[in-house]
Amino acid sequence: MAYVAANGIRMHVQRMPAKGSAADGPRPRVVFIHGVGTDSLASFYLTLAAPAANAGIEVISYDLRGHGRSDRPPTGYTVADAVDDLAALLAELGVAGPVHLVGNSFGGTVAFSFAHRFPDRVASLVAIESEPATRSWSRKIADRLDEGAEKLVQAEVLSWIHDHHGSHMSRLGKAFGQVLATTSITRDVPRGPLLSGADLAAISCPVLAIFGAESHVVDVAETLPDLLPGCQVEVIPGYEHGVLMQAPHEVRDLVLPWILRHEPVEIR
Amino acid sequence: MSSPELAVDEQAVLDDLTRMIAIVLEDIGPLDAEITPDTTFRDDLDLESIDLVALGGLLGEQYGDRVNFAEFVADLDLEEIIALTVGDLVDYVLASLRAED
C-alpha cells in the first residue's frame, strides 16, 4: 500500500498512471478528493479512477486525515488544514503543475478553497454534491456533524442503522462516531475559514458542479451560478447525495470529457 | 513482481486471495470462517470499500499490471460490487492472466 508522509501525518495515496504512449506529451492529472464521514478514496477508486486512467489522465487519489487508511490525528480538521494537507501531499509527490480537482461532497468544498488559495495550480474544478465554504454551508455542516456526534455513539441509533441499512453501514457509522468523538472534526470543519462573495468571484478556473436531483443539497444547484458566474451546473435526475456511487457512468460521462477539454495545452 | 512459472489454476489463485484477505483484515483479527468461492466480500467478510482498495493493491503486487482490480470494479455497478464473491475475483484473475498467455 502507498503511504506518503506529508504535513506531519501519514496519508494513504493511490495513484494510477495515464494509459497510452508517453510520446503523446504531458498528460492531464486529476486529484480526487472524497467526502467527510463514512467516505474514503474508495468512492473514486471504484468509479472514476480506472476510466480516467484509460482516458489518458493520470490519477492521484488519497484519504483525507481521519478517513480511510490515513492517520487520524486528534486535531487539524478545518478546510484550511485539508488544503494544507493536499498542498503538502502534491509537494511530496513532486507535482508542481496545474491539476484538475474533482471533489465529492466535502471534497468539493476543499477543492474550492484550494483553488482560492492556489489559483495557478488548478486547471479546472469539478464539484460533485458540493458547495464552497460559505456561511450557509458552515451552518448546515455544523448541524450534520453535531447530529452525528450525538447519535452515532448511541447503541439504539446504530441498531436502527443496522436494521434499515445493514451491518456494513452500521459499522461505518460507528467508526465515524468514534472519529467525531475522539477528534476536533466537529468543531473544526465548520470554521472553514469561510469564503466571501469576493473570494468566490476570484476563483478563475473553469468549474463544473454536479448534483443528484433528489439530493438534500440540490438547492445549491440554483444558488451556485450566482456565486460563481460561468460555472456549469449539471443535475442528474433520479439520484441522491450518493450520485457518484449510485450513477458512476453518468458522472464519468460528464467528468472525463470535461477534464480533457480543460487541460491547458502550453503549461508544463 | 510476477514470476515466470506463475501458477494459474483456480486453487492457487484462491489460496493467493485467501492470504491477501488475511493481510487486508489483519487489524480486525484472524478470519474465523473458511474462504470459499461463494464467500462475499461485503456480507461474509465485512470488508469496507477501502479494504477492497487495499486488496486491489495486493493483487497488483502479486500479479503485475495484468490484473487491474480498479478496472474490473469500474465495470460493475454498486449492487454488483456489494454482491462480489471471492469466486468472481478468482475468475477475473484467471481470465486476466490467461489473456496474456
Image: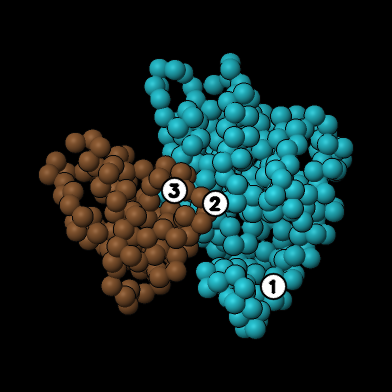
Chain colours: A cyan, B brown
Picture coordinates of residue A179, whole percent (x, y): 60, 69
In the rendering, at what x and y percent does residue A176 appear?
60, 68
At 82% from the left and 41% from the top, the residue drawn is A224
Characterize the local packing of mark 3: few (<14), some (14-19) or many (20 or more) Cα atoms within 10 angstroms: many
The residues tagged by marks 1 and 2 sit, at their Cα atoms, a distance apart of 23 Å
Numbered disc 3: secondary structure: helix
**Quarter assignment of residue B54:** bottom left
Reading the chain from its start, which is encountered first: label 1 or label 2?
A: 2
* Disc 1: host chain: A
On the rendered image, what quadrant is the N terminus of chain B found in?
top left
Is there any visible trace of residue B52 in the rendered image? yes
Say which of marks 1 and 2 sits in front.
2
For label 1, the residue is A149
Please give the chain letter of the residue carrying mark 3: B
Q: Is residue B39 above or below residue A34?
A: below
Q: How far from the left and from the top, in percent, is residue B91?
A: 29, 51
* Amino acid residing under circle 1: Ala
For disc 3, the marked residue is B73
The residue mark sitting in front, 2 or 3, is 3
Q: Amino acid at mark 2?
A: Ser
In the rendered image, which residue does mark 2 sit on? A43
Disc 1, disc 3: CB below 8 Å?
no
